[in-house]
Amino acid sequence: MNIHEYQAKKILKEYDVNVLNGYLVKDIKEIEKVFKKIETDQVVIKAQIHAGGRGKAGGVKFAKTLDEAVNAAKNLIGKKLVTHQTDKKGVLVRNIYIEESCSIKNEYYLSLVLDRKNNGITFVASTEGGMEIEEVAKNIPEKIIELRVDSFIGLRDYQIRFLIDKLKIPEILQSDIKKTLNGIFKAFNDKNCNLIEINPLVLTEKNELIALDAKMSFDDNALFKHDDILKLKDNTEKKEQEIEAEKHGISYVSLDGDIGCMVNGAGLAMATMDSISDVGGSPANFLDVGGSAAKENIKNAFKIILSDSKVKGVFINIFGGIIHCDLIAEGIIQASKEAAYDLPIVTRLEGSNVEKGSKILHDSSLEIYTASSMAEGAQKIVDLTRKEHK
Ligand code: GDP
Ligand code: MN
C-alpha cells in the first residue's frame, strides 16, 4: 500500500526527520487561509498523487503571491497529471499540498528498501539527489551507495559513519543526518514498510537537512497490525477492478491491452502475458487468482475481467496443483453461467486431474476453446479476438 507525500511527511516528522511546514488543500477556497500561514517568501504547491516524477510533469509549482498560488492550484486541482510513472491518461489530482519553500544548496537521494536479494533491509543513497534514481543507476552507477542493515542487529554507528562519509555530508549536519537515518530506519521497522524514499533530501542555504519529498510503501500483509496506516489508504486512484480484486485477495493489475488473463501463480501470469505479446496480442491485465478457494476465486476473477469494457477475449491459463483441474473447470463453468458475456474464451489447463477437467469443459454446453499448450492458447485467443474486431 502506498500513501501520499503529505501523509509520509507527517509520519516521518514523528520520527525526527526534518520536514517543512505544509498544509493539505482540497479546495481552491482554502488557499488564502493557508497562504497567510506560510512565512517563507514563496510557497511550493505539490500535486498529491501516488506517483513520482511530478516535478518534471508540472505537478510541483512555486508561487510568491496569493494570486500566483491560486492560479497554480487551479492548474492542478481537478486536472489530470501525466508523469513517467502514470499511464498515458494520467491521474486526477484531488488534493494539493502547500508547503514552505527553501533554497537548496545540495540534493541527496536516500531510501530504505526491503531487499530480498540481501535478505534484509538496504539503504540506497546517492549524492546525485533530485534526479530519477533509475537514471543515476543507469548512467553513473558508481554514484549509487548501497548498505545492507541486519534487521535484528539494527543500524550501527559505523554504518551511519559509512553513509556520512560516502555522501560527503558536511560536518555541521552530522547530528541531523544521524537523526534522519535512525528515524527512517525505525519508521521502516515500526510500520512494516517495503520502501521509504526521500528524493531529494536537501541541504539548505541555512544549513538545514530537510526531506523535501517523501514516499512510503507498506507491506500489505502487515497492515492488519497498523490501524493508523490503514486509515491513510486512498483508493480513489485505483480502477474499480483493482479495488474489487483486492477485496477477494486476488492480485490484479489493469493494463492497456484487450485480452483478459486469468492465471494462477504470479510467474505463470507473467509468462502468459509474455506469450500473448509474443504472438502480437496485448494483455488487458495481470491476474493471479491465488491458490485457495478455487471455485469462488475463479468466479470472482472472471467477473472482474468481464467488468472491464476493454476486454475482447479471455485466456484462462491454470496450472492445477493444489486445486485440481476438475474443480477449476467447474468453477469456470459456474462463473460463465452466472456472468452474461459473449466473448471468445480459451482455456488451457495443466496438472492434476487435467483429463477430468478437460472432459468437464468439453461436455459443457459452453463455447469454450481449449488449448493443450500455453503458446497454442495464446495464439488461439489472439486470433479469435482479432476476428471479433472485424
Ligand atoms: P517528484 O518530482 O514527484 O519526485 O517531486 P519532488 O517533491 O521531488 O519535487 C521535484 C523537485 O522540486 C525537487 O527535486 C526540488 O528540486 C524541487 N523542489 C521541491 N520543493 C522545493 C523547495 O521548497 N524549494 C526549491 N528550490 N525547490 C523545491
Ligand atoms: Mn521526488
Image: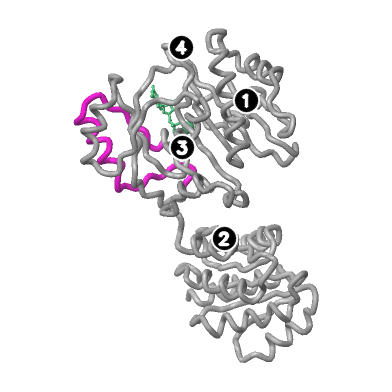
Q: Secondary structure at mark 1?
A: loop
Q: Secondary structure at mark 4?
A: loop
Disc with the residue nearer the chain's start (2 vs 4): 4
Disc with the residue nearer the chain's start (4 vs 3): 3
Q: Can you tell me whether the CB of the residue at mark 3 lies under 8 Å from the nearest atom of ligand 1? A: yes
Q: Tell me the mark number nearer the camera, choosing from 2 and 3.
A: 2
Determine the residue located farthest toward the top in the rendered image.
171
Q: Residues within 10 Å of mark 3 (few under 14, many from 20)?
A: some
Q: Amino acid at mark 1?
A: Ile
In the rendering, at what x and y percent does residue 138 appear?
A: 62, 32
Q: Residue at x 65, y 14 (%)?
A: 165
Q: Nearer the viewer, residue 257 or 233?
A: 233
Q: Amino acid at mark 4?
A: Asn
Query: Residue at label 1?
Result: 140
Range of the magenta residues? 57-86
Query: Residue at label 4?
Result: 207
Q: Residues within 10 Å of mark 1 (few under 14, many from 20)?
A: few
- Decide: is 230 above or below 346: above
Q: Residues within 10 Å of mark 4 (few under 14, many from 20)?
A: some
Residue 72 lies in the magenta stretch: yes
Are the residues flagged by discs 2 and 3 in contact, CB closer than 8 Å? no
